[in-house]
Amino acid sequence: MKILLSDAFDKSLPGKLARFGEVFDDKDRLAEADVVMIRSKTKCTKEFIDAAPNLKLIIRGGVGLDNVDQAYAKEKGIAVFNTPAASSVAVAELAMAFLVAIPSKIIPGHRGMIQGQFLKKELKRTELYEKTLGLIGIGRIAREVAIRAKAFGMTVIAFDKYVSSSDVAEMVSFDDLLQRADYISIHVPYTAETDKMINAASIGKMKTGVIIVNTGRGKCINEADLAAALQSGKVAAYGTDVWYADPPDWESCPLLKKDVPNVYMTPHIGASSNENLLRIGEIIEEIMTEFTKEK
Ligand code: NAD
């Protein structure tokens, strides 16, 4: 069996997979691959799949499968697996990091210090304590965020179109969430329904000065509408790990314009903790064991 590691995985993965066949990371050898392992970077489009005539299995080390043309893979008889349970803590910790760092003014404080400015008078912090956090989606990652936010003394409310009760959050309508939340954290997958769900209309219903954190998917945001809301002050700050085009186009992404304030960003590293990459490797090994047993 020939296994192409098309994206970056933990360095222990090739060793774990050696018993299943030849493991390589040379993308020019896609045509030979029986199995392709991807994370976020590789897009398994129709063209990609057509370029791999031997392909029987795609494994996405991660949660969302929006970078795989699942319908076309199914048509071609290619099995598709992901590792949905592995990443919850890693992503939840990054969401919490934004939720703590933004109102704590860690980033402007740090930037000032580097530039020789001691901004003690200028930087006023706000607390998470007794504030309301609105979670959009109450799946695996949001649940971990809720538990951590409660430890900070936050009230946690959530909207989920497909979940009506939760032991970690008060379930509310989308409109209620927008109106009540001091902080909003996005944890839905990207689907036709969640496409640009944060837009001028939904932002209009939010509290002035709301802080939005996005470790879900960039395509859930209308970036131009959000950039305008950051400029007007309606939205106080946006912390994001994910982008409409991921990675973003440096020239055209509205959130990267110099006159759009208070955008705090990371390059889609939510799942990239050392611990998570190790967990993903272990789950991939289990998937390979089951898959090869069936053959
Ligand atoms: P999950 O499936 O456990 O939870 C998603 C929740 O969203 C579910 O409860 C679902 O009912 C809800 N939902 C779906 N459509 C909705 C809609 N239209 N309106 C409201 N709620 C809706 O998934 P998870 O493991 O918590 O991951 C959530 C998302 O986080 C993933 O789909 C992925 O896009 C993103 N993610 C990002 C990173 C990163 O590196 N930043 C890593 C992993 C996952």
Image (spheres, rainbow, N blue to C red):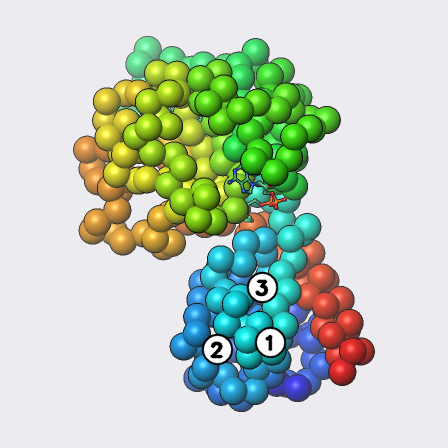
Measured in 3D between alpha carbons, the distance from the residue under mark 3 to the one under mark 2, in whole angstroms, is 14 Å
Query: Percent from the top left, x then y, of residue 182?
Result: 46, 18
- The amino acid sitting under disc 1 is Ile
Measured in 3D between alpha carbons, the distance from the residue under mark 2 to the one under mark 1, in whole angstroms, is 9 Å
Q: Quadrant of the N terminus?
A: bottom right
| Label 3: how many Cα within 10 Å (few below 14, some 14–19, many 20+) | many
Residue visible at 45% across and 38% down in the picture: 214
Quarter containing ligand 1?
top right
Q: Kindly identify which numbered label has been placed on residue 164.
A: none
For marks 1 and 3 on the same chain, the one whose residue lies earlier in the sequence: 3
Residue beneath label 3, please? 60
Q: Helix or strand or loop: what does disc 2 sit on?
A: helix
Q: Are marks 3 and 2 in contact (CB under 8 Å)?
A: no
Instruction: Report the side of 103 relative to 114 (left or right).
Output: right
Residue beneath label 2, please? 49
Q: Helix or strand or loop: what does disc 3 sit on?
A: strand
Residue beneath label 1, please? 78
Q: Nearer the viewer, mark 1 or mark 3?
A: 1
Residue visible at 32% across and 40% down in the picture: 222
For marks 2 and 1 on the same chain, the one whose residue lies earlier in the sequence: 2
Q: Nearer the viewer, residue 98 or 134?
A: 134
- The amino acid sitting under disc 2 is Ile
On the question of residue 123 being in view, the answer is no
Q: Is residue 288 above or below residue 214?
A: below
Residue visible at 56% across and 13% down in the picture: 129
Q: Are marks 2 and 1 in contact (CB under 8 Å)?
A: yes
Q: Is residue 213 above or below residue 60?
A: above
- Residue farthest right in this picture: 293
- The amino acid sitting under disc 3 is Arg
